Image (tube, helix red, strand yellow):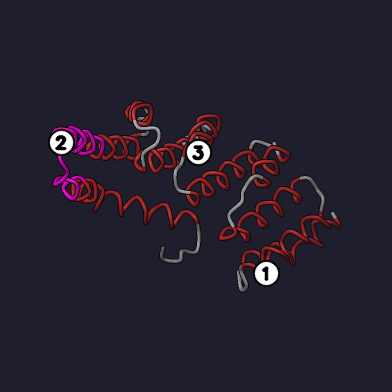
Amino acid sequence: MEHFATEEQQVEAIKKFWKDNGAAIVIGAVLGLGGLWGWRYYSDAQRTAKEQASADYQVAVESIEADGNAGKLDSFLGKTESSGYATIGGLVAAQQAVSNNDYDAAVKALTAVKDQAADAHLATIASLRLARIQLEQGNGDAALSTLKAVNDSAFDGNVKEIEGDVYVAQEKYDAARMAYTEALEAASGNVLLEMKLDNLPVLASE
């Protein structure tokens, strides 16, 4: 997968990939198995279901992005819990919920993605966003617990940065310094992280 600066960029790229290629991938996979004996009837049913899922996903995402209507997306997610569409849809739903200041709905959507996503990276992205929301809700301990469960080395820097943010909120500045330092080791040259680290003495003196 192409390297992206943030998990937000990764999700946007995956959303675009599914939008542009989802139906073609499904149809291609089905047609590739068409030579197997007895597969025709099964593949026709599966192809129809997948094509409908693709269409339903697009309608649901466009609806929630246009006017914040989560009803269609909730219905879609309930029918396709284990699919890639449902994973991306859950992240979209959480993003919209945060925009509406509905953090409980965002927590629900992200928890579902974290627990059900087949792709480990997407599950990690959901965990990182969940931890940020838990911190925003003032529940730093829950955020740390969520981060502790992340086991994806590709996101070590992100995990440590959020840990640092939690410790700052808890006024544990020594722990924050350690977390930010480790985050910088994983993301050298991150200006925002450097600013957070440099600002710790000021916060500690207040």
**Looking at the image, which residue is at 50% across and 59% down?**
6
Q: Quadrant of residue 62?
A: top left
Give the prevailing secondary structure in the magenta stretch. Answer: helix
Residue 36 location (% of width, % of height): 17, 44
Magenta part of the chain: 30-53
At mark 2, the secondary structure is: loop
Residue 31 location (% of width, % of height): 16, 47
| Residue type for callout 1 | Glu
Query: In this view of the protein, which residue sits in the foreground, 145 or 73?
Result: 145
| Residue type for callout 3 | Val
Q: Is residue 115 magenta?
A: no
Residue 150 location (% of width, % of height): 62, 48
Query: In this view of the protein, which residue sits in the foreground, 87 or 97?
Result: 87
**Looking at the image, which residue is at 74% across and 46% down?**
169
**Looking at the image, which residue is at 78% across and 45% down?**
170
In terms of sequence position, does the residue under pointer 1 or pointer 3 come before the other? Answer: 3
| Residue type for callout 2 | Gly
Q: Which residue is mark 3?
A: 98
In terms of sequence position, does the residue under pointer 2 or pointer 3 come before the other? Answer: 2
Q: Which residue is mark 1?
A: 185
At mark 1, the secondary structure is: helix
Residue 74 location (% of width, % of height): 38, 28
Taking the view exactly as shown, the residue that stands out farthest to the right is 205
Q: Which residue is mark 2?
A: 38
Query: Which quadrant does the C terminus fall into?
Result: bottom right
Asked if 80 appears above or below 131 in the picture, the reply is above
Q: Foreground mark, 1 or 3?
A: 1
Q: Foreground mark, 2 or 3?
A: 2
The CA span between labels 2 and 3 is: 48 Å
